[in-house]
Image (cartoon, rainbow, N blue to C red):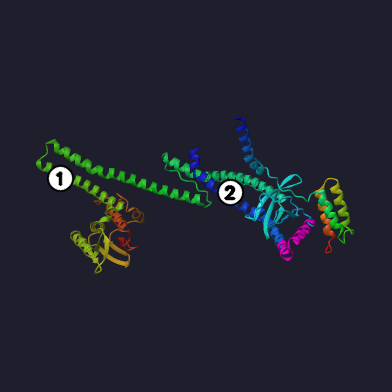
Amino acid sequence: MLRFLRSAGFRFALLFAGIFIGAAALFALVLWYATAGSLDRQTDASVRTDALGLIERWREAGPGAVAEAIADRLASDVEGTAIYLLLDSNGVRLAGNLDRWPAEASPDAPWSFGTVQREGNLIDARLHVLELGERYRLLVGRDVGEKQALRTLLAEGIAWAAVAASFVALVGAAVLRRAVEQRLRPAALTAQAIAAGDLSRRVPVSHRADEFDRLGESMNDMLDRIDRLMAGVRGVSDSIAHDLRTPIARARAKLEEALDGQAAPEALRAAMEQGIADLDHITRVFGALLRIAEAEAGARRAAFAPLDLVPLLAEVAEFYGAVAESGGQAIAIELPARLDVVGDRDLLAQAVGNLLDNALKFTPPGGRVRIAARAPARDRIDLVVEDTGPGLPAADRARAGERFFRADASRGTPGSGLGLSLVRAVAHLHGGDLLLEDAAPGAAQPGLRATIRLGIA
Amino acid sequence: MVRRMGRLQILALVLIAPAFAMGTEPVAQITTDSRDYCRELALRLASMPGATSEPARSLAEDGLRLCENGHPRSGVARLRRAIRAAQPEH
């Protein structure tokens, strides 16, 4: 029961019922004011006019004229609703159709409702008391019994209408609650199925393009994204297991070989060095994974500081210059005088270093690697590293930022498949992205142009 | 002792009686639904110049008959209509 009361459908239904009943009450109020209220106002206006006429007679000719006017008015009162009573200073009745002064009528409250007797029945009357002067008192009133009966009828009608309106409000509320529940049911069932482990389920969309469809589409988008992320996590786990199994197995074999005790000291040393190298490789992979995770989580943003990119890029280019020379490659540098940015110096250096490392790895001897930087807009800086190597097919470029992804052509080269993942994570950390494209589109060796696009933080 | 109780009872009666009297104050009564008023209206109509012309005459006769037959309110209403009809402007 409590669950039912707390449901959104019930609250919507309650809101609907409240608004409906409120509107019905307002309608009844207006109706009452326009009918019963109008009758009251008409009665008061008639009594006021009557009284003003008698006051005029009093001023013109005194009590005798007022008594005569009252007799005339009573004689021609075809509706039979008029009530008059004129008393002199001693309280003696001079004219009118009441045998005594009503208890409810008092000069202190000139307008009042009272009860008078007519042919043995008590009837309601509207009474107006006037002090004429010389302690003469005049009472002008109307029998409002019939109007009261009409008011009662109207009140009964409104009461029945209120009952009908309440019934309609409750039925409408129940229908509304059911409609909301029915529309939310597919989403709820899908959520339950997903909670039970079936991640393939999606919310059926009715194509009415309403709020519920938009909610369903958003849920489906969210589920697709979760699916992709889970697939990514699964892929990373598989890759870690696959890529680290070989060096660990090799290190273990070398160590077992060393334990054998029969190998020559040189062979023992070589086995231990190989084991250490394998373990270093594993450490580097984990280090790279941790750095990517840090960059993606934004944890390094606290270390952001203003810096000039030009000397940093020159330093990295110089570092890799020696590698290029040994491979018979050339590094061309195109840098402006100054490029100010707020960011993490170490991560940016490593990202550019990774790009240069990749470029040199895939550029054949005699090839050229170009490193350039520019600010094409006020809030944008592009760091470009391009080579004259074989480039990357479009399908591989789309996956190049994934952890442990290695294109088929690169299987024979050393590397862990984490370099571009870190570059992309660093670009995202700095409010930018990593763009990969052909350096010379259409050429036999199109090369690869990698652009780190930074937003200036 | 008995005489003293008798005096107290009388005193209480004297004090309480007005309160009872106030609570049972009679309701004002409309006096125009009566045979006397029928006659008063008939006299008033008779003094009017148009009393013998129709429809005043017939209405007056109906009114008086109703009053005589114990329906003074209806009779008064007919006589009032007769007076209206007999008035010069009508």
Is residue A213 found inside the magenta-colored segment of the image?
A: no
Instruction: Estimate how packed mark 1 is, as few (under 14), some (14 to 19) or many (20 or more) residues with alpha carbons within 10 Å.
Output: some
Depth check, front residue: A365 or A60 = A60
The secondary structure making up most of the magenta span is helix
Residue at the location (52% across, 52% down)?
A210
Image position, residue B76 (x, y; %) = 81, 52
Instruction: Give the alpha-carbon distance from disc 2 to disc 1, as whole Å.
Output: 87 Å
Residue identified by numbered label 2: A21
Q: Which x, y percent locates residue A381?
A: 30, 64
Q: Quadrant of residue A194?
A: top left
- Amino acid carrying label 2: it is Ile
Amino acid of disc 1:
Glu
* Residue in the image at 45% along x and 40% along y: A192
Residue drawn 33% across the image and 46% down it: A233
Q: Is residue A379 left or right of residue A185?
A: left
Q: Of callouts 2 and 1, which one flags the residue occurring earlier in the amino acid sequence?
A: 2
Magenta segment boundaries in residue numbering: A53-75
Name the subunit of mark 2.
A
Q: Quadrant of the image for the C terminus of chain A? A: bottom left
Q: Nearer the viewer, mark 2 or mark 1?
A: 2
Q: Which residue is mark 1?
A: A273
Q: Is residue A296 above or below residue B3?
A: below
Is any atom of residue A225 visible in this view? yes
Task: Pick out the residue farthest to the bottom.
Answer: A337
Find residue A30 and report its image quarter. Answer: bottom right
Residue A224: image x %, image y %?
41, 48
